[in-house]
């Protein structure tokens, strides 16, 4: 998942020397928790009203609310309530590890950062050979390798030790990774192994492009705005889809064009809800949680 590499890169890129870990954890919690709480409540309401089979156990629901549910790699926990929130539970694990991880990598010279990047990539590539698919996909200690790769790449760029390979090669490697995942790779290798190198190259290419001040589509105001809404969109989209599946269950299977129309409709509803969540939940919730910090 490119998001885990990007998360490690961004946090290491923007980290402040001497930053207090408690303040760091508070900032990160304020970033994700307000939307998580609201979408958990929405998922529970959806389960109670529409899909009783999705009602979790008290233990699983509690773990979900505390963002530790993917730390138990069984479906009853990691897919409870809002299924996509498993990745937030991984991020919570990464946030706990980041102060120590950053302190260690900040002291490393380039050759040792390369070693960290190589070891992290090797773990991503080899994990599907030795671990159960659910562990490879959901378990935070395994996904930590992608996060650590992002941290190491950020430090290499910060030190001026590497400027990447540029967008064309990065895009080509990423495309080959996707093609390999789609055509040749068994399931567990599709999760991250096939695309980890390409995504790492793309993230570095984007960072170097920004440092050089080159024009980039990702810095367009519209893209920046969509980036601001991305967390809320991610958290709400599966709830919209599940509601749509329930509503449409009594209708015949749609054809290609009606299905495309329903997909666009679901995307539009998710985008509208993500704007509302960002403006009325995420931003005020963050301000409230950071008050006095």
Image: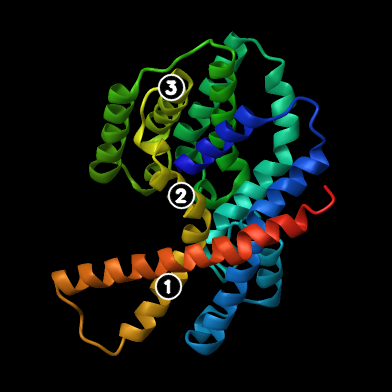
Q: Nearer the viewer, residue 199 or 191?
A: 199
Displayed quadrant of residue 41: bottom right
Q: Which residue is mark 3?
A: 213
**Residue at 43 percent of width and 40 percent of height:** 192
Query: Which percent across, then down, holds residue 87?
Result: 55, 53
Q: Is residue 191 in view? A: no
Q: CA distance from mark 1 to mark 2?
A: 21 Å
Q: Is residue 30 in view? A: yes
Question: Which type of secondary structure does the marked residue at label 3 adopt?
Answer: loop
Left or right for 195, reference 59:
left
Number of numbered discs on residues: 3
Query: In which quadrant is the N terminus drawn?
Result: top left
Q: Earlier in the sequence, mark 1 or mark 3?
A: 3
Q: CA distance from mark 1 to mark 3?
A: 38 Å
Query: Which percent across, then down, holds residue 133?
Result: 47, 50
Query: Which percent across, then down, holds residue 134?
Result: 50, 54
Q: Earlier in the sequence, mark 1 or mark 2?
A: 2
Q: Nearer the viewer, residue 233 or 81?
A: 233
Q: How did the renderer colour the structure?
A: rainbow
Q: Which residue is mark 2?
A: 225
Q: Which residue is mark 1?
A: 240
Between marks 1 and 3 in the image, the one whose residue lies nearer the viewer = 3
Residue 151 sits above or below residue 225 on the image = above
**Residue at 47 percent of width and 26 percent of height:** 207
Q: Nearer the viewer, residue 4 or 182?
A: 4
**Residue at 37 percent of width and 30 percent of height:** 198
Q: Earlier in the sequence, mark 2 or mark 3?
A: 3
């Amino acid at each position: 998942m490119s998001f885990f590499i990007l998360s490690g890169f961004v946090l290491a890129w923007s980290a402040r020397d001497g930053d207090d870990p408690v303040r760091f954890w508070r900032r990160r919690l304020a970033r994700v928790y307000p939307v998580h709480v609201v979408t958990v409540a929405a998922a529970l309401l959806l389960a109670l009203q529409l899909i009783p089979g999705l009602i979790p156990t008290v233990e699983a629901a509690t773990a979900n609310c505390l963002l530790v549910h993917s730390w138990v790699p069984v479906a009853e926990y990691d897919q409870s309530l809002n299924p996509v929130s498993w990745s937030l539970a991984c991020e919570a694990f990464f946030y706990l590890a980041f102060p120590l991880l950053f302190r260690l990598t900040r002291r490393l010279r380039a050759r040792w950062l390369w070693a960290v990047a190589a070891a992290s990539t090797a773990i991503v590539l080899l994990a599907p050979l030795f671990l159960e698919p659910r562990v490879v996909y959901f378990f935070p200690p395994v996904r930590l390798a992608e996060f650590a790769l992002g941290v190491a790449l950020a430090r290499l760029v910060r030190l001026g030790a590497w400027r990447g390979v540029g967008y064309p090669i990065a895009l080509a490697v990423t495309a080959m990774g996707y093609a390999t995942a789609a055509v040749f790779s068994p399931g567990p290798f599709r999760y991250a192994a096939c695309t980890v190198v390409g995504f790492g190259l793309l993230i570095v290419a984007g960072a170097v492009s920004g440092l050089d001040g080159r024009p980039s589509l990702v810095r367009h105001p519209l893209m920046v705005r969509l980036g601001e809404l991305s967390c809320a969109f991610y958290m709400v989209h599966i709830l919209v889809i599940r509601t749509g599946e329930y509503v449409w269950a009594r209708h015949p299977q749609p054809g290609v064009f009606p299905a495309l129309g329903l997909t666009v409709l679901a995307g539009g509803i998710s985008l509208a809800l993500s704007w509302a969540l960002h403006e009325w939940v995420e931003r005020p919730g963050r301000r409230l949680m950071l008050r006095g910090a």
